[in-house]
Image: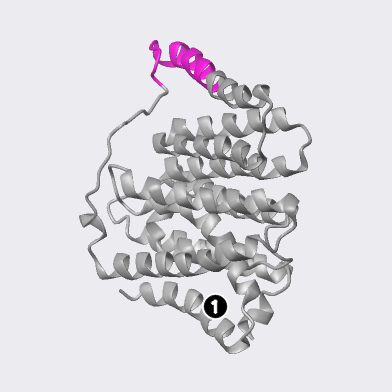
Amino acid sequence: MITSFFNKSKPINFVIVFFVTLLAFLIARIELKNEVVTAQFFLKQTALFLIAIVSILLLNFIVSKNSLTKKNNYEILLFSLFLLTITQTTKNSDILLANFFVLLGLRRIVSIRSQRDVKKKLFDAAFWVAVASLFYFWSILFFILIVLSLVLYSDNNIRHWIVPFLGLITVFVISVGASIVLYDSFFGLFKTSFQISYDFSSYNSAKYLIAITMLISFGIWSSIFYLQNIKKKKKAFRASYKTVILAAVLAFFIVLIVPEKKGSEFLFLFAPLAIIITNYIEIIQEKWFKEIFVSMLIIVPFLLLLL
């Protein structure tokens, strides 16, 4: 019953996703006990909520435009449920913005499959990833995804390999110029931090352990079938599907190395993971197992609210 409800794209699905995302935001804000609720605070939180909603809509656009899943709304449902699973992902404004720009970059990378305006798409992808890195430095790792996409498409055009670096340089030059005007400094806008940490003690709580275990176990299990199923896709779409799995790997790597592990870093993992798990849900033949699988993804986030 649950699977049939989200099996087709319907307006009611977007309404449900909206309220699940809103709940995730409200739960996270309840934990901000020391914050004084002012008009400025309310406007900032509203803006962050809108960024999250637009990110979800952007994910839906990427998926539907590039046929990364069938015509259903599982991916946006999963994204909102992931936000509810780790509500800390809604707290960090820099990561919310960085993730939004990474999704803009991912949109351009995946669309390279059409082989139209390739140079423009590569420039745009690098530009948006570079902008994302201004808000959260380690999101620059998604630049690797652009290079890997050229490998996947076996692109031997030397100009295509140069264009992404021009996108990076463009953002750098604009940022330096803006820094000089605003801060009278060359690097005032840059939030560069090369620090790496493998201290996972901040995740040492029942809520985090259950949430991370669910994400990783469901993600790995779905990825196995996702990779096997790529061979069955049309040749023109295979590189796009591989790009998604590579994005998930890079996002997981960011989670591993970031110096401050507060939970918000998992946000980069949500979009590719939602696409991967959606693809697995679509190929499950046993209806009873499909219902249980989806039900667990829905129930666990709400149970975690009780911890």
Q: Residue at x 37, y 56 (%)?
A: 88
The answer to which quarter of the image holds residue 69 is: bottom right
Q: From the image, which quarter does the N terminus lie in?
A: bottom right
Residue 270 placed where, x, y %? 50, 57
Q: How is the image coloured?
A: one colour
Q: Residue at x 43, y 72 (%)?
A: 301
Q: Name the residue nearer the viewer: 118 or 41.
A: 118
Q: In the rendered view, would you say 179 is above or below 292? A: above
Residue 41 placed where, x, y %? 42, 45
Q: Confirm whether the magenta stretch covers residue 136.
A: no
Q: Name the residue nearer the viewer: 151 or 289.
A: 151
Q: Confirm whether the magenta stretch covers residue 177.
A: yes
Q: Is residue 23 left or right of residue 108?
A: left
Q: Residue at x 38, y 12 (%)?
A: 185
Q: Which residues are magenta?
A: 171-188
Q: Is residue 18 left or right of residue 254?
A: right
Residue 295 visible (yes or no): yes
Q: From the image, which quarter does the C terminus lie in?
A: bottom left
Q: Name the residue nearer the viewer: 195 or 222.
A: 222
Residue 77 visible (yes or no): no
Crowding at mark 1 (Cα within 10 Å: few <14, some 14-19, many 20+): some
Q: Identify the element where label 1 is drawn.
A: helix
Residue 26 placed where, x, y %? 44, 61
**Residue placed under numbered mark 1 in the picture:** 294
